[in-house]
Amino acid sequence: MEQELREIVRKLLQEGAIEHFIGYAEGVEPLHTTPCFIEREEEVGALVWSPFCPYNLARYLHQMKNGAGKVGLVVKGCDARAIVELVKGNQIQRERVVVVGVPCQGQVDLAKVEEAFQGAEAVEDAGDTFLVTVGEEGHSVEKERLLREKCFFCKHPISFEYDFVLGEMSPFLLDRRSELEFAMIEEMESLPVEERRAFWRAQFERCSRCYACRDICYACYCQECIFESRAPRWLEKTTTSLDNQTYHLIRAWHMVGRCIDCGECERVCPMEIPLRQLYKKVEREVEQLFDYEAGMRVEDLPPLVTFQVDDLGLVI
Amino acid sequence: MKAIKKPHLVEWLNRVAQAYDLLGPVLDGVVQFKRVKSTNQLVFDYPNSVVPPKNLFLPQTECLFAFRREGGSIILEPAGGLERERVLFGIRPCDAKSLLLLDKLFNRDLVDTYYQEKRRGTTLVGLACPSPPQRTCFCTSLGIDPLSPEGVDILLADLSDRYLVEVTTERGEALLGFSRELFLPSAGEEKPRREKEKSLEGIEEKIDSLWEDDYWRELSRRCLGCGVCTYLCPTCRCFDLTDVGSTLGGGRFRCWDSCIFADFTHMASGVNPRPTGKERVRQRYFDKFRYIPEEYGVLGCVGCGRCSRYCPVAIDTRTVINEIIARSTK
């Protein structure tokens, strides 16, 4: 698959079809990758693909907003939803992006690997299982034990047209009941409001407002973020409990109808705030109120840019 | 050298905590240095905290003074200040080294009284690093010894059932006085040794030759412009001043800021002298490896590896250093 990808990119660069290609390259640490920008043919060898490619590279398409040329990138099925949303939001033109789809079979949660197999050097996808190598030993592990939570509920945009596909695109299916997708939300909703408030207050209190969750987010493309606006000043730089709550709740509101559950915000949070839980709640509300799911079809109208007469009373 | 048995350490800290505010590593979501009410909250088996203990001396949000309008005049009231002397338990040698650097930075032309008061009022009890180190640790490459007592008043080194105790200052000696009977002469145990690697000699000149190098542009394309590397860096110390409240009353706060943020150098005129990620990323590495060495004679990085460990897109400072060396013409 890597070879195929490299050939595609080599050809695209040769033909001058793209200015650069955004993909995954090996990281410094074992099991890590890092996003990479390929500008020259001789660099295509750096491109890799593995179950350790969490980055939603569509985030980097923000950079092409002011340019004129074309850019290529590799996307997992889930990441393609970000492209759908970026097109919908007039942030990119579909024809300026060469999308190479990769049939991902689930991404590994590094924290889970570290916890279960300290010092793991390699994790290979062996179909139904992952093969973990620690020193001389090899362990065959059920995929469920090491996967990122979001991969249990893998979703692809229904009618997305990739320019290239490595193999065949299909959602990655695990034998999990889909009703489990919002189990953590239901559990939280069953708690008394005071407990919920205390839970989130404690989470937000340790937030350092590094803004990694915002800056990794494909959907955060505002030219001037509300949190940086000086006049009016909506939020101070102070990091009191209230300031931090304000930050996270405003951001959650801004994700309405836009969050595609790529889970990147939670992955990058150094303080381990369970942000996915917050955004799953938003996703659930949108689904229940508007029967809408972000990132599925370019034609779908986002719920907050349209209205129906019977919305009155529902939202207002 | 002395030694203390592990159960006795807690006993000693309990006594210390009666006379001082005790700060130490606690697990609150992640490992953080915080004030503890009881030694039960402390964790002893941790690689290092996520946020370095610089936040105990330069809090992320610090009220410098409060103000209020009263009649025709404005009243200013000092804020902050330590209520009691503090003991910080569990600081690692790299972070202790970073405080020595911050001391220089905050006492150069003007003495930063807010920082200084907290430093003077805090006794440091360090913990030598466990072996093997974290994958991202590289202090030895910068000439720092992960078992060194430099910068702390007392250094403890884990010898499985007890700690070897190295007291380096009178303040440390005074702290031992709380339970002198628990500290026994060590039976000649040797502190484990760690080989120092070659330090990065000449990195200042090397990076200096790369001001216009394309590498900074390449690097900045991957960089998201978030504050992880700076906020979690033990030697980053930039802050912004902001007044919170109204004309009737409020406070002046200083809050951490980051050179990686796009608005860091954004001026009121609208001009931004570091207009793109390229200039901002370059600034960060030039600060560590050029400006600080030039001004203070030491490297601006202590090799704690937090930036590499927590970077959302796996930008690794070790790679950057290697690139600087490889690309340099000097």
Image (cartoon, coloured by chain):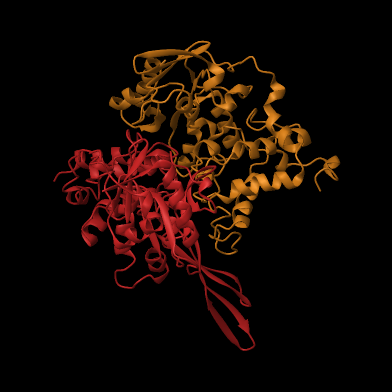
Tell me where residue A150 appears, x and y as whole percent: 59, 27
Is A54 or B275 nearer to us in this picture? A54
One can see residue B53 in this view:
yes
Tell me where residue B177 appears, x and y as whole percent: 37, 59
- The colour with which the image depicts chain A is orange
The residue most toward the front is: B181
- The colour with which the image depicts chain B is red
Residue drawn at x 68%, y 48% as measured from the top left: A198
The residue most toward the top is: A127
Residue drawn at x 25%, y 38% as measured from the top left: B192
Residue drawn at x 61%, y 75% as measured from the top left: B249
Query: Does B88 sit left or right of B40 as displayed?
Result: left
Tell me where residue A244 appears, x and y as whole percent: 59, 53
Tell me where residue A108 appears, x and y as whole percent: 49, 24
Query: Does A291 sit left or right of B201 as displayed?
Result: right
The residue most toward the bottom is: B72
Query: Does B180 sit left or right of A293 as displayed?
Result: left
**How many labels, in total?**
0
Is B310 or B247 nearer to us in this picture? B310
Depicted B189 relative to depicted A129: above or below: below
One can see residue A18 in this view:
no
Depicted A263 relative to depicted A236: above or below: above
